[in-house]
Every structure is written in structure tokens, then in C-alpha cells.
Image (cartoon, helix red, strand yellow):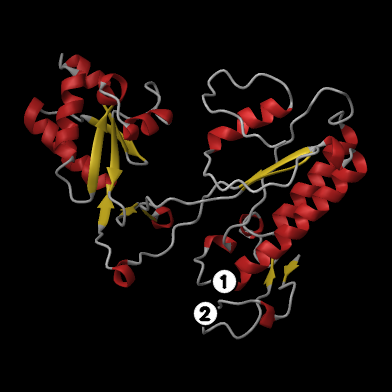
Amino acid sequence: MTWTPVHPMEKYIYLPEWRDTPFKYKFDDDRRNKFRRLIASPFVNDEVNLLTEELLDKSNIGKDEVPDMLSLMYYAGNYAHKTSQECAMELQDTYVRLDRSIAHLLDVIDKKIGLQNVLFCITSTGYVDTESADHGLYRIPGGEFHLNRCAALLNMFLMATYGEGQYVEAYYDQQIYLNHKLIEKKQLDLSEIQNKAADFLMQFSGVNEAYSAQRLLLGSWTPEIDLIRNGFHRKRSGDLLIEVLPGWTIVNESNPTENRIIRSAHIPVPLVFFGNSVKPEIINTPVSVGHIAPTLAHTMRIRAPNACSSTPLTIR
């Protein structure tokens, strides 16, 4: 498999100055990483369509009066997780090929089921790969935050406060897990240690907020805490959750490829409903992802999920 641009080079705009030749990638020249690179290219979308055709041919989906839901995910990100400057032409070509992949999907569904029998819902995750820091361009203050060093200093603080021991059991993804067995053995108050540790973490450069598990579960409500609670589980999440300031880089010394820059900017993404007699209309009022499920449920005339609090959009 070889990837070259669909259009002539002059059709692609906003290219860096050094780009003077089209790109060309072969996915069979590196046996170890060819699949890793393939899933970060537009060719993976063709594989999704092939699997969808197989599913429609060999299953009963869309062949009776009971509504079915088919969820597909296409890739439209940077090739091989490079920066946008490095793969500006590749990214534009990815969207050209994505448009063709969606067109092919519509043709397949039209032939096998009929577009008049289908409601399409298209949106995006809004996820983008971490780009290089733009401190110099916008004069944004920032720095590096090392979670492993933070956890080591926290353990030293707890040792100085409560005596010898390995109080920090693990750390991962801005979360720190305390050694509950040691704390129980020493007959210490877990909530007190969590809150003291959170106060200590607040003194680190680059830390915007430190939340203890006790505060998330039993503390007063705030909009920020409400969002964090959505991804917090008392039996799986850490005892301490660290919120790093925007513009700072979280450094993973064991795996530098996982370094990421914290950005809190709003990322708008499209939400498109079409098919099934939906009348053309543009809704400029911002909506959240929580509106998708009740809208689909309303269209299929079934109950919305029992935890759904958003109202459906009027798409008819």
C-alpha cells in the first residue's frame, strides 16, 4: 500500500515553506511499525468501510422493523501523530479521502438499506494530538511538570509528618495513589492524609488545583468538581487528582512520547443529523455532546437513557 496525494500539489494550501515536493509513504517498508502507521492514516477508514459492508451482508442489521444502531469511527488526525506543520499536506489529503470514505459509506447503505430508512449522526471527538508549545508566539507562561518527582516529594513530606514508610503506592495520568494498607496499619486517618497531601501539592509550580478523593466524594459542589466527578470512580481512581495549569507540559520521563501540553481552550466540533426526512436547518445555538443520545432516542421513539438530563434537539 502506497499513500500519495489525491490532487496535484498546487491544490493544497497553507503548506510550510520547506514543503516543495509531494509526500509518498509505503506501508510495507517497516514490518514492525507498518500497522501502527496505517491506523494513523486515511487508509484505515477504507478498512472500516470494508468491515461495514461485511456486517451489512452477513447480519440482520437494518433488515427488520426494529431500529438498529451502527457506530463507526473514522480517523482524521495527523499522520503518524506528527505535528500539523510536519504533515500539513498529509492532513489536507486525509480530509479529502475522508470525504470519499463517507461518500462510499452512503452509497453502500443506500444500496443495501436505503437512505430513506436511516438517520445519520456525524460528529467529532474534538481530540487533537499535542502540538509544540507556543510560549514564544503568544507569551504564554508555562513550564514542565514531572509527576514522578511530585510523587517522590509528596512521599518525603508524608514520611516527615507520619513516620517512615512508602505512603505513595503509585502514580499515573495526573493521579496519585496512596498506600491504604500502610495507612491502616499505622491507624492513621485517610481523609486527613488526603487533604494534607492536597494542600502540599498546591504549593508546586504548575499546579492549578489538587483534589482529594474525600473532597470529590463529600465536598461541596462546584462546576469544576462536577466535571471531574464524571471521570472519577472511588474504587479505581487515585486518592489525589492534580489539575495542571494551561500552557504547562506534563513530562513522562520513562516515555517522552507521552509528554503533553495542557490546553483548556474550547474546541468546537460539528454535529450533523441528516436522512430519515430531516428538514435542512442550521442550528447556531451551541449544544453539548449530551444532546446526541436523547435526540436519537426521540427520533426512534424510545426512552432516553435513564441518566440523560439533556433535552432532545428538534430535527424534524
Task: Indicate whether 78 appears above or below 18.
Answer: above
User: Does 89 sit left or right of 64 as displayed?
Assistant: left
Quadrant of the rendered image containing residue 34: bottom right
Outermost residue toward the right in this view: 111
Residue at 27% across / 68% down in the picture? 139
The residue that disc 2 covers is 16
Say what secondary structure mark 1 lies in: helix
Are the residues flagged by discs 2 and 1 in contact, CB closer than 8 Å? yes
Residue displayed at 14% across by 29% down: 196
Q: Is residue 182 visible?
A: yes
Q: Which image quadrant is residue 71 in?
A: top right
Q: Between residue 223 and residue 285, name the one nearer to us.
A: 285
Residue 27 visible, this angle: no
Q: Which amino acid lies under the numbered mark 2 shown in the image of this protein?
A: Pro
| Viewer-nearest residue: 116 or 245 | 116
First in sequence, mark 2 or 1: give its number. Answer: 2
**Disc 1 designates what residue?**
88
Residue 239, located in which quarter of the rendered image?
A: top left
